[in-house]
Amino acid sequence: MRVTIRDVASLAGVSVTTASRALNGEGRMAAETRTRVQDAATTLKYRPNSIAKGLVGGRSFTLGLLTNDTYGRFTLPVAAGLANAVVDRGVSVLLASYQDDPELARINLQSLEDRQVDGLILAGKRIDRAPHAGLLKSGIPTVHVMSACDDDGIGFVPDDDGGARIATQHLLDLGRRRIAHVTGPAAFAAARIRAESYVRTLSDMGAAHWGDPIFGAWSEQHGFDLALQLFDGKPGADAPDAIFCGNDQIARGMIDGLTHLGVGVPDDVAIVGFDNWEIFAAATRPPLTTIDMGLVELGRQAGLCLLDLIDGREVASGLTHTPSRLVIRQSCGALSTDIAV
C-alpha cells in the first residue's frame, strides 16, 4: 500500500500537521523534530501525493511541451534536457505534437489546459517560424524553443552564428585554405546565419572563401550532387580542400559523392557538418566531425526559465542563444575531442 503522511507522522511520533509542516519546510519547531520527521519519510520511502499537493498550492506540477517537430529530431533532445531540469522539483512533462495542423494544435492546447499545466514550452523546427497564432493566447506562462517569438516573448535557440564560426575556424586551423560552404535553403534563417558567419570568419582571418555559399536542400542528395559538380574531372588545385556543410545530411551525401569519385576524406578534402545527429554522424564513413547544437542544454535552460516564470520571478524577454560545440571525429583529419564555442 502507498505510504501516507499519517504513516510518517506515526513513525516520527508527531501529529499529521507537524509532519506536513516539517516536510514542507514550514512552521516553527525544534530542529530535532524536523529531522526526525525527515528521517521517518526517508525510511518509509514516502512520496507526497502530487494531486493533494497541487490542490493546496494551486499547482499541477506538470508542464506541457507542444511541438510541430513530428520526427522529434530537435524536440526529443530538448525534452530530455527539460525533464532533467524539472524532475528534482517534482514536475513532470506532457508532450504533444500538432504537425502544423491548426485544429490539432487547438485540441492539444485545450487538452493541456484541461490538465491545468503550470507552464508551456512551444517547440519548433525553424528559428524563423512562430508557433500557430492560436497557441499564443493561452494565458499560460510560455517559453519558446527553436522557434521565433515576439519581442516581449521569451525564447531559446542555438547559436548558429557561433557554431559556424568555430567550424570555419577549425578548418583554417587545420591548414585548409580553399574552404567551400554547402548548405540548405536560403529561405531558412539558420542557413543564412551560418553562411554569413562562414564568410565573415574567413574575412576576419584574411582568408578568401572558395566561391559563394551554395544553398540547396537539407538532404544527402544535395551533398552528393554538389560533390560531383565541384570535383568531377577537376584538378586538385581548382577544387576545395575543405567543405563546411550546413547540416549532417548534406555532409554525409558529400562524403558519399567524394568516395564515388575516389577523392579521399579527409586526406584530400576535410568535411565538417552541423547538427551532431549522433546516430547519423557516427555511422558516416569516415565518422563525421560536426557542430553539436547543445539541444539538451537548451532544453534544460528553457525549463529552468519556465519554472522561474511560474514562480513569479522576473525573467528578461527576448531570445537566448545557447552555446554550440565542435565534435571532432575523423572526417576533418584532426584528433577526436569536443570544443565549446
Image (cartoon, rainbow, N blue to C red):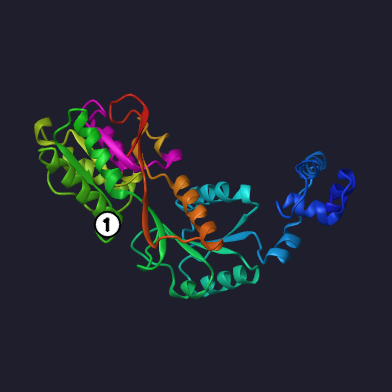
Q: Is residue 154 left or right of residue 333?
A: right
- Using the rendered view, name the quadrant where residue 115 is placed: bottom right
Query: Does 263 appear in magenta?
Result: yes
Residue span colored magenta: 251-280
Query: Does 33 appear in magenta?
Result: no
- Is residue 216 visible in the rendered image? The answer is no
**Quarter of the image containing the C terminus?**
top left
Image location (x, y in percent) of residue 114 = 64, 72
Q: Is residue 212 left or right of residue 225?
A: left
Q: Is residue 184 left or right of residue 51?
A: left
Q: Nearer the viewer, residue 18 or 320?
A: 18
Give, as a three-letter code, the residue at label 1: Pro
The residue wearing badge 1 is 185
Q: Residue at x 51, y 54 (%)?
A: 303
- Using the rendered view, name the quadrant where residue 40 is placed: top right
Q: Nearer the viewer, residue 191 or 150?
A: 150
Image location (x, y in percent) of residue 31 = 75, 43
Q: Residue at x 44, y 39 (%)?
A: 278
Q: Residue at x 61, y 49 (%)?
A: 87
* Number of numbered labels in the structure image: 1
> Please, is residue 273 above or below residue 140 in the view?
above
